[in-house]
Image (cartoon, helix red, strand yellow):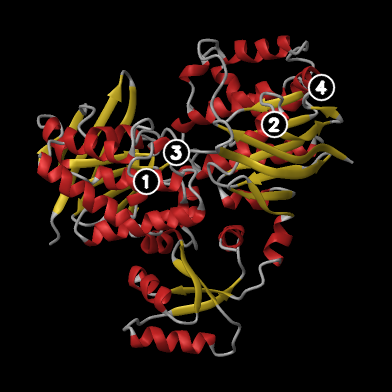
Amino acid sequence: MSIVEVNNITKTYNKGTVLATDSISFSVSEGELFGLIGPDGAGKTSIFRILTTLLLADSGTATVNGWDVVNDYSTIRNNIGYMPGKFSLYQDLSVEENLEFFATIFGTTIAENYHLIKDIYVQLEPFKDRRAGKLSGGMKQKLALCCALIHKPVVLFLDEPTTGVDPVSRKEFWNMLKRLKEQGITIIVSTPYMDEANLCDRIALMQNGKIMSIETPENIIKNYKKELWAVASPNMHSLLTDLREFELTESCYAFGDSLHLSFKEKNEDNRSKTLAFLGSRNHSSLEMNRINPGIEDCFISLMQQ
Amino acid sequence: MAEQVIKVERLTKRFGDFTAVDEISFEVNKGEIFGFLGANGAGKTTAMRMLCGLSIPTSGAASVVGFDVYEQTEDIKKNIGYMSQRFSLYEDLTVIENIKFYAGIYGLTKKQIKQKSEELIDRLGLHSETKKLVGALPLGWKQKLAFSVALVHEPKIIFLDEPTGGVDPVTRRQFWEMIYEVSAKGVTVFVTTHYMDEAEYCNRVSIMVDGRIEALDAPRKLKEKFNVSSMDDVFYLLARGAKKAAI
C-alpha cells in the first residue's frame, strides 16, 4: 500500500522563470526507506516542502497517508515528522526543553514514545541541559531527529540530514535510520551523497527538477548496460587527459584512486587497444580491470543521456 | 628540497579549558594539493582560521607564504586565496561586478582588473553571462566562478573549505580538474572535504582527530599503512575513536 503519492507535481519560482520540479510523479510504500538523490537545485527541497504542506505546487496533486496536501494540510501537519535541511530547533532552549516543547505541541509526552527515540536520545542525555545552539553539528542533528520523531509520525521527512557531515557521523546516522525503519516508520530522505543511495529501499535519481530514474539501487545498477573499467597509473592527471582524447572512449571520470572508463562500443580488444594507446603516450605501470558500476557511475551516465 | 609554503610547529589553540587544536606540526610544499581531513569538531576549521590569519594561536609557531601567523596576519590575508561552500560570491551582484569587487578589494589596479576580468571570463566561457546576477547561475558555475575569483590576485596558496558540497558528480570532477590545473602552475592547494574519493586526488592528506593530526601521508601510503583498500576505511579507522566529536 502506498502511503505517499505524488502526481505530476510542477513548481516554479520567480513568476515561472525558475522550474524547480517538472511534472514529478512517484509513490512510496508503507514502511519503505525512500531516497531522493541529487545535487543542489535538483528539486529535492521543493518536493519536501510541498509534501509537508509548507509550499503550494503550481499544478499536480499529492497525498500523504491518503490526505490531500492542500485540503487536509492541518491533518498532515499533525501526523508527520519533518527535519528541514537547515537546523530549525530553538537554539536558546536546552536539549530537554526542545524535546518537551515538540512533544507538548503535538499533544504527547516524551514518555509515551520514548521507545522510538531511546537509541538516539541516550547519546544526547549527558548534554540534556545544554542549549541546542551550543551543540556540535552531529548532536544537533540527533536532537532534530528526536524532535521530529517524538509524536510517532506516520511518515518521517528528512531533507539532507547528512549534508556537511563527516563520513563517520554519516554512517552512524544511516544506522539510526535503519533501526527506525525496523520499527515500521516510513522515511523519505534526500541526500547529495551518492554512496548513501545504496542504503535506501528505492531511490529517485534527480537532476534539474526531473527524476531520471526511480528504482531499487540494485536495479539502477543492473540497468547500466555498458562495460566499465577502472584504469590507474602513477600519473593520474595526464592519464585522464589522454584517455579523454582516445578515440574509443565514451566517457572517463576520476573515481578516487582510479579512473572509470567506458567505451563507445563493446569489443573484445578494447582493453588491449587502450593499453597500447596509453603505452604510446608513455604511461607505464598501468592497471586496467573490469568493474561493476556504482550509483554515482549510473548518475553520471543518466545525466549525459 | 621542495619549497615549503606552510610551516606549522606545535600549533595550539585553546578556548578556555578546551583544546581545539593540540600541538599540530606539518609542512606543505609549493604546488602541492594538501587534503586536510577530520570529523566534524576535530579542529579543522580552527586550524585553518589560524593559517588564514583570522585567529591568533595560543602557542606554537606557524608561517604561511613566509609570514608569521602572530605578527603578520594582514600580509597573510593579502597573499592567500580563500573559498568556502558557504561564503563565496555576492548573489545580488552580477558576474562581472563580483570579479571587479574582489579584484578591487585585493588592491589590483584598474588596468589589472580589466585584464584579469577578461582573462577569467574567457577561461570560464562566461561571455554571455557577465551581466547576469550570480544568484541566477547554476551552482556548478557559481563554484567555478568563486574558485577563479579567489585566485584573481594570484595568491601562492588557495584554501578551499568543502568546495564541492552539494555539487553534482560531473561538476565535482570538473572542479577537481581546475584544482589540478592551478597546482600544475605552482599554486598550493589546501583543501577540506567530506568526500573520501576526493581525498584520493590529493598529493598528501592529513587526518585530524580530537585536535591532533593522527595521520599524514600520500593516500596510497596511508592505505598501505592501515592495510585497507580506500581512504574511506582509513578515515573510519582513525575517526571512529574520536572522543571530543560528541561534545
Q: Residue at x 56, y 47 (%)?
A: A193
Which quadrant: the C terminus of chain A? bottom right
Query: Residue at left 74%, top 55%?
Result: A216
Horizontal side, residue B93 vs residue A194: left or right: left
Q: What kind of residue is marked 1?
A: Glu
* The N terminus of chain A lies in quadrant: top right
- What label does residue B136 carry, if any? 3
Q: Determine crowd level at label 4: few under 14, some 14-19, many 20+ residues with C-alpha closer than 10 A.
A: few
Residue with the mark numbered 1: B129
Residue sitting nearer the eye, A198 or B143: B143
For residue B91, which quarter of the picture?
top left
How far apart are labels 4 and 1 at the CA level? 42 Å
Q: CA distance from mark 1 to mark 2?
A: 30 Å
- Same-chain check, marks 4 and 1: no
Q: Alpha-carbon distance for marks 4 and 3? A: 33 Å
Same chain letter for marks 3 and 1:
yes
Q: A215 or B137, which is in the foreground?
A: B137
- What amino acid is labelled 4 in the image? Asn
Residue A71's label in the rendered image is: 4
Left or right position of A162 against A99: left
- Chain designation of label 2: A
Disc 2 and disc 3: Cα gap in Å? 21 Å
Three-letter residue code for mark 2: Ala
Residue B169 in the image: state x and y as whole percent: 50, 54
Q: Is residue B157 above or below residue A45?
A: below
Which class describes the residues within 10 Å of circle 3: few (<14), some (14-19), or many (20+)?
A: some
